[in-house]
Structures are given as C-alpha cells and as structure tokens.
Amino acid sequence: MKPGFLVVLLVLPAFAASAGERLSCPDPAAAVQVGNCPGEAELRYSFNGFCSDNRRIYQDDAALCVDYADYRKAKNVAQWESADGTFTAYLSCDSVAVRLSTVRGARMTVSRQGQISRLGCDYGEGIVFTHRTRLQCRIEGDGNCPDDQQRCIARCE
C-alpha cells in the first residue's frame, strides 16, 4: 500500500465527520413499523409485574398503576422509523397507521442532553419522530413548517 493512499484513508473519515449532516423532518406517511405491538396478554402480564412492586407505592411512582387503561395507553406502543431510518418514534398501536397518512405539518426542535443532541419533529397528536446524534445541531429558520416538511431543516456539525 502506498503511503499517500494511507494518509487519504486516515484523513477522509475526519473530513466526512466535520462536513456535518443536513436533516429535514421525515414524511410520516412513509414511516415503517419496526417493532411489534404487545399483545393483550403481554400487557396484562407486565401490568401485574410492574404494579405489584411495593416500592412504587412508597416512591410516588404508581401513577400508571391506578388504572389498567392508563397503563395500557402508555405501554401499548411500537417503534417506527422514517423511510431512510434516520428518525425513530414510539407510537401508539391503536390506529396509528391511519393517523400517519393524514398528519401534516411539523415543528422541529433541538434539545441537548449531556453530549447528545435530540432533534425532534412534532406532528401533533402525540406523533414525534426523533434523531439523536453527538453532533451539535441547529435549526435553519424558526422550526415551524406547517405546510412543507422540507422547510424543517437542521444542520448538525
């Protein structure tokens, strides 16, 4: 292997990482479900196990255990991905596929938690697709794009 070629191989990844990413909010109608929805038996089993832990009562962590319907609403979710796999969401298994094809408009937000940037695309009705990265992200514009998801753009460097 030639030494010049080796230098190019070592410098190329650093250059690619510094170039950054340009991300836009995904089309929710093109999202794909990648996780399974839990069955009713699995939800009841996990409710009984989760809520029978006495520690929850004494640590004020029993809000979901008051009513099975509340627990089911919170835990009956599956993972979804954008068509390109860049954004993910945990969405309710109750009629989410129908809603994904009809939602429009988004609001893009950026938050930071430790060294991770969380880029979120909120479509309302509890539908939020997120992208996590170690890069620093900033939104181009004000982050509101009710008519066109392609206007919700963030640059991560």
Image (cartoon, rainbow, N blue to C red):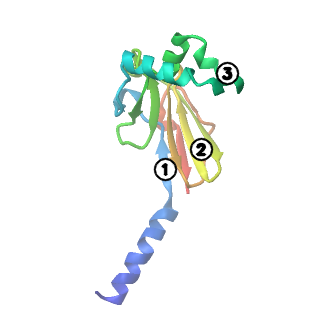
Residue at 48% x, 70% y: name it: 14
Residue at 40% x, 82% y: name it: 7
Q: Residues within 10 Å of mark 1 (few under 14, many from 20)?
A: some
Which residue in the protein does label 3 denote? Answer: 57
| Disc number for residue 22 | 1
Q: Is residue 40 above or below residue 121?
A: above
- Between disc 1 and disc 3, the foreground one is 3
Q: CA distance from mark 2 to mark 1?
A: 10 Å
Q: CA distance from mark 3 to mark 2?
A: 42 Å
Q: Amino acid at mark 2?
A: Ile
Q: Nearer the viewer, residue 34 or 28?
A: 34
Q: Is residue 114 above or below residue 50?
A: below
Q: Classify mark 3: helix, strand or loop.
A: helix
Q: Classify mark 1: helix, strand or loop.
A: strand
Left/right of residue 59 with respect to residue 135 in the rendered view:
right
Q: Amino acid at mark 3?
A: Ile
| Disc number for residue 73 | none
Left/right of residue 58 with respect to residue 105 in the rendered view:
right
Pointer 2 or 1: first along the chain: 1
